[in-house]
Image (cartoon, rainbow, N blue to C red):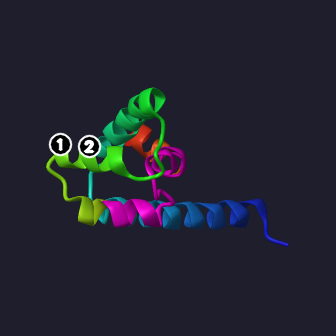
Amino acid sequence: MASKQEKRRRAALVEAMVAEDTKEAIENMPLSLAVLGELFDYLDETLEQEGCDHSPRATQLFLSQKGLDPNQVLPWLEEQGGNCDCEILANVEESWESEISKNT
């Protein structure tokens, strides 16, 4: 059985690996964490007023207004579990909200 010191060492290694993976994921994002946070705020307001039509219509509009290419960002959002505006808000925000809070 591992000692407490060894368990702490292993936990620190795992934490460092997760931090490195997260850093790499952030570097490979097609938009910044700040803009991603703005997208979530925009979707929150828009969906409250208009609801979701089960498309990424509002997200596409937001991306265009920010000068971002939807053809680069939408596939990334889909990989994160967001196929339509409400899924982007629910699934993607859940995955990234802690990083956005830390970095903005």
> Which of the 4 image quarters holds residue 66?
top left
| 68 with respect to 98 (left or right) | left
Q: Which mark is residue 65?
A: 1
Q: Quadrant of the N terminus?
A: bottom right
Residue under the image location 45 percent in, 34 percent down: 47
Q: Looking at the picture, does residue 103 appear above or below residue 13? A: above
Across and down, in percent, residue 104 comes to: 33, 37
The amino acid beneath tag 2 is Phe
Q: Which mark is residue 9?
A: none
| 83 with respect to 67 (left or right) | right
Across and down, in percent, residue 29 comes to: 31, 61
Which residue is at the far bottom? Answer: 1
Q: Secondary structure at mark 2?
A: helix
Residue 104 visible in the current orientation: no
Q: Which residues are magenta?
A: 74-94
Across and down, in percent, residue 16 comes to: 50, 63
Residue under the image location 64 percent in, 62 percent down: 11
Magenta highlight: main SS: helix
Q: Are marks 1 and 2 in contact (CB under 8 Å)?
A: yes
